Structures are given as C-alpha cells and as structure tokens.
Image: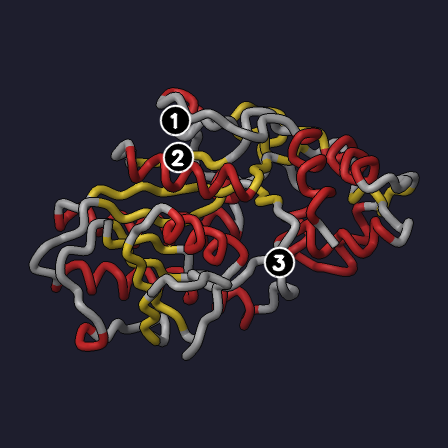
Amino acid sequence: MKILVSGATGFIGRELIRELVRLRHNVIILSRKAHIEFGIENVFVQSVWWDGIKIDHTKFNTNNIDVIINLSGESIASKRWSKKQKIKIIDSRVKSTKALIDFISKLENKPKLLINASAIGYYGNANDKLIFENFPKGKGFLPDVCEQWENEAKKALKYNVQVAICRFGLVLGENGGVIRKIYPIFKNYFGAVIGSGKQTISWIHLEDLIRAIIFIIDNNISNIINFVSPEPINAEIFYKTFANSLKRPCFFKIPSFVIKLLFGQMSQTLLEGQKVFPKVLLDNNFDFKYKNINSAFSEISKNIH
C-alpha cells in the first residue's frame, strides 16, 4: 500500500514507520525536519517537508494514496499548561488535521482510510467506571482538545473516506514516552508512587499499538477505537511493578498536592484515572501480545538502558 504519515518522527511514529517499511509498504512522511534517519537500510522512504498547516502537492506523487495516518501533535506532558502552551497543544492537532482534510479534498483518487490519533483523555476523569468506545465526553481541557481534534478528522467522511479515531492510552516502550522519563529515577533508587496510587492507568505497549494500527488497516476497521490493553491497572501496582522489573524498591509516595504544585493543571494527567476497555479491538479478534503489565514491563526492562 501507499501510506502517507504525519507525525512520523515522534515516539510512536518512528516505530510505526519501521514496521510499515518491514511490511514493504510505500511510505511518504510529512515532517518539519529536512532529514530523518530511521535506521532503515536499503529502503526508500520519501520525506516531504511541511509546516503542519499546508501540504505542497507539487513535492510528491499524490496519486493512489491508500491510507493516511495522522499522529501530529504537541506533547501534552512536555511543559506546564500555560495559556500559550494550551494553544500550541490545540493548534498542533487541529490545524495539522485540517490541512490533511484539505489535502484529501483535492485528491482525484481519495484514500480508503484516515487513521487519526486521539487519546483516552476524551473521557475525562472517570476512575470508577468501565469505559467503552461509546462512553460520553468528559469535562475539562483534554476532553475539549480531543473533541476538536476528532471532529476535524471526521470531516473526511464527506469525501467518502473512512475514519478511524484511535484513542491512545498511556503508551509504554523503552525508547520514549513516560518510561524514558521515569526510568532514570527508578534506576537510581528514587522510584515512587505518584499521588494516592488509587487512580486507574489504562495503558498499551508500543508494539501492540503498532500492531493494532496495522490490524485496522488490514481489516478495514473504522469509527472510534480504544487503544489500551484489556487489563487496566491500579497506579500503585503500576509503579511498583515497574520498580520490581528493574530490581529496584518503590517505597515512597509523592502526595497529590506536590504534583499539583510542580505541574499545575497538567498534573491531572498523572493524578486522574480512567478504566478504559478495548472493546472494538477485541470484538474484531485482535490478539494483544502484552495483555498484562507484568509481561509489558518484563519486556521493557530487558531492552532499556
């Protein structure tokens, strides 16, 4: 297949590109970087510069694109949520998606599928309820961001392009994301449970996330899809299991008020819980390689350094 990917240089995107190439797909990358190194030898992956706002049709062959995958977006956990940062978080998602919809509208041959990233942040704080894909939108900044992002992506439907909205949980992998941030702390014997530890963490191993994206392409699955493992976990068990996988202790707790002082409103991503279930993936017989947190952390601890 011919697959166009935006947001390809991030934690998820880089691994996705490697897998698409391994499967011998023809990949076109939209990137703000002039040169991208994926560690892939003897394989041509076309990289096209863009500014996240407008796509230059003259820079590459736009004929017969089968699938578009949109992973673009400023990290929600990189900085405190100042007014300026909130605007950046929203615009990096909505404007890039708007550009892709405009691009689709001008294509003579439309892609069959748009895969658009989103997040389980859509559901807001709902720690005590089991969340399926039809669960209503929550209240707050993150649910509002997800709603705007998803609504923009759904505009592809009017061009008879199927849309898969992928609501990602906490993505675990040794080369980025939350694991790369907390690993040095735990490795140096300062591991701790964040907040009360009672909040529920809905997570997915990066390898399963990539496999699930390929799965929905191969099986023509669209609509809303929760990208989480089938076994959400209590936060205290999450952090202590990670510590145990590294053969390190985890005796302490960082009180919620300290997290709020350090991170401001962004602290809600660490302190609030969601018990999300991947009903659509399981109903379509997707087989998770890492169903439980022990298997995920066991694999990560072998490879992290």
Residue 274 vs 300, above or below: the answer is: above
The image quadrant that residue 265 belongs to is bottom right
The image quadrant that residue 11 belongs to is bottom right
Which kind of residue does numbered mark 2 sit on?
Ile
Residue placed at 34% from the left, 64% from the top?
A: 45
- Say which of 131 and 185 sits in front: 185
Task: Measure how far apart labels 2 and 3 are at the Cα level.
Answer: 23 Å
Which kind of residue does numbered mark 1 sit on?
Val
Q: Secondary structure at mark 2?
A: strand
Disc 2 crowd rating (10 Å Cα; few below 14, some 14-19, many 20+) is: many
Task: Measure how far apart labels 1 and 2 are at the Cα level.
Answer: 6 Å
Kindly identify which residue carries mark 3.
Answer: 77
Kindly identify which residue carries mark 2.
Answer: 225
- In the picture, the quarter occupied by the C terminus is bottom right
Is residue 158 visible in the rendered structure shown here? yes
Lower position in the chain sequence, tag 1 or tag 2: 2
Which kind of residue does numbered mark 3 sit on?
Ala
Q: Are marks 1 and 2 in contact (CB under 8 Å)?
A: yes
Kindly identify which residue carries mark 1.
Answer: 280
Q: Position of residue 221 (x, y in %)?
A: 29, 33
Residue placed at 60% from the left, 68% from the top?
A: 82
Q: Position of residue 47 (x, y in %)?
A: 34, 70
Q: Are marks 3 and 1 in contact (CB under 8 Å)?
A: no
Task: Measure how far apart labels 3 and 1 are at the Cα level.
Answer: 27 Å
